[in-house]
Image (cartoon, rainbow, N blue to C red):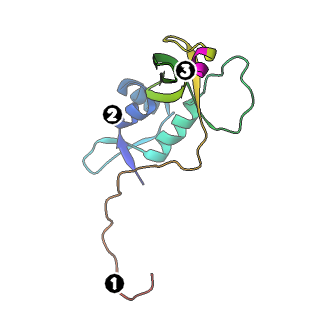
Amino acid sequence: MTQMRVRDAATFLGVSEDTVRRWIEKGTLEASHDASGRKVLEGVEVARLARELAVTPELHGATASSARNRFTGLVTQVVMDTVMAQVELQCGPFRVVSLMSSEAARELGLEPGKVASAVVKATQVVIEAEPEPAAPASGPTPTEGDAL
């Protein structure tokens, strides 16, 4: 299982290290010690809490949608010419950029400081992850031609 230090858990949860330590003391998060004696948390525990804490703010008058990836935040910049607009939102720690027609940006009244949501519906999303360290081999390793 993936383990992480308090500092990394705090980064992923968007809180201070002190908050993570208080959650450990309170029992909200479970921690253990690694071989070096450092306090670590199981990645699955941090993910569980991140999910519990994730509350997407709703815009008033929002309609039902099949899209599940909604990022609500503040418009931070709008760059517009006669045809296209580039709109940047700051959604918590995430920066989301959208290209749209200038007409759409004007109709939505997009300007810095306005609250808006970026809604993403995609059939292909690329996910990257750090490779897990190789486990020590136990038993014979497959050779060329062996069935896996």
Indicate the position of residue 4 as horizontal and vertical percent values.
36, 43
Q: Which residues are magenta?
A: 102-106
How far apart are the two marked residues, 1 and 2, measured between alpha carbons? Answer: 39 Å
- Is mark 3 in CB contact (under 8 Å) with mark 1? no
Indicate the position of residue 101 as horizontal and vertical percent values.
56, 25
Three-letter amino acid code at disc 1?
Pro
Q: Is residue 33 in view?
A: yes
Q: Which residue is mark 1?
A: 140
Q: Which quarter of the rendering shows the C terminus?
A: bottom left
Location of residue 53 by image quarter:
top right
40 left or right of 108 in image = left
- Is mark 2 in CB contact (under 8 Å) with mark 3? no
How far apart are the two marked residues, 2 and 3, measured between alpha carbons? Answer: 42 Å
Q: Which quarter of the rendering shows the N terminus?
A: bottom left
32 left or right of 50 in image = left
Give the mark, 3 or 1, whose residue is nearer the N terminus.
3
Q: Is residue 91 in view?
A: no
Q: Residue at x 52, y 12 (%)?
A: 111
Q: Which residue is mark 2?
A: 7
Three-letter amino acid code at disc 3?
Ser
How far apart are the two marked residues, 3 and 1, measured between alpha carbons? Answer: 63 Å
